[in-house]
Image (cartoon, rainbow, N blue to C red):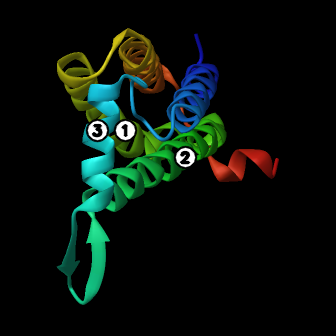
Amino acid sequence: MKTTLLLRIAAVLAVLFALGHTMGGPWTPTEERSAASVVDAMKSVRFDVAGSSRSYWDFYYGFGVSISVYLFAQAILLWLLATLAKTQAAAARPFVVVLLASYAANVFVTWRYFFVVPLVLSIAIVICLTLALVASRRHVDIEPSAHLT
C-alpha cells in the first residue's frame, strides 16, 4: 500500500476515535446510584486553583473535552501528512514517528484503563502508521525541479 493511503486510513480511524470519545461525554460509564454519588461528590467538592474555584468534576470534564480537541487535531494532522507524503515522504517521516509513538503509548494506556473499542482503534492506527513508515522508506521523493520539465 502507498504511504498516502495508509495515512488517510489512519486519519479516518482517528476521526472515528475522536467522534467516539466525544460522543461518550460526559465519560461516566453508568447511571447506577453508586457511580452517581461519586459524580455528585466530584461536582460538590470545590477548591482554589491559581485563583479560580474549581471542582474535581471541572477537571474531569475539562480534560475529557481537551482530549477530544487533541484527537480531532491528530486526525487532521494525519490527513495533512498524507498530502505531504505524496511528494515528500522523507519530510513526513519524523511526524509519522511522533504520532506512531503517541498512539503506541495510547495502546498501553487504553488496554490498562479503558475498554475494547478504543483499544482496537488505537491498534489499527498503530498498524497503519507502522506500515506507512515502512512504505515511506520505499518511496522515492519527487524532486521539485522534476515538475518543471
Which residue corresponds to mark 2?
Answer: 77
Q: Is residue 136 left or right of residue 36?
A: right
Which residue corresponds to mark 3?
Answer: 37
Residue 140 place in picture, x, y as percent: 53, 29
Q: Residues within 10 Å of mark 1 (few under 14, many from 20)?
A: some
- What is the count of numbered marks? 3
Q: Are marks 2 and 1 in contact (CB under 8 Å)?
A: yes
Q: Earlier in the sequence, mark 1 or mark 3?
A: 3
Residue 115 place in picture, x, y as percent: 33, 15
Report, in whole angstroms, how far the alpha carbon at label 1 lies from the one at label 3. Answer: 38 Å
- Amino acid type at circle 3 is Ser
Q: Nearer the viewer, mark 3 or mark 2?
A: 3
Q: Residue drawn 40% across and 23% down? A: 30
Find residue 102 and report its image quarter: top left
Give SS at disc 3: helix
* Viewer-closest of 6 and 91: 6
Q: Is residue 10 left or right of residue 119?
A: right
Q: Are marks 1 and 3 in contact (CB under 8 Å)?
A: no
- Amino acid type at circle 1 is Leu
Which residue ends up furthest to the bottom in the rendered image? 51
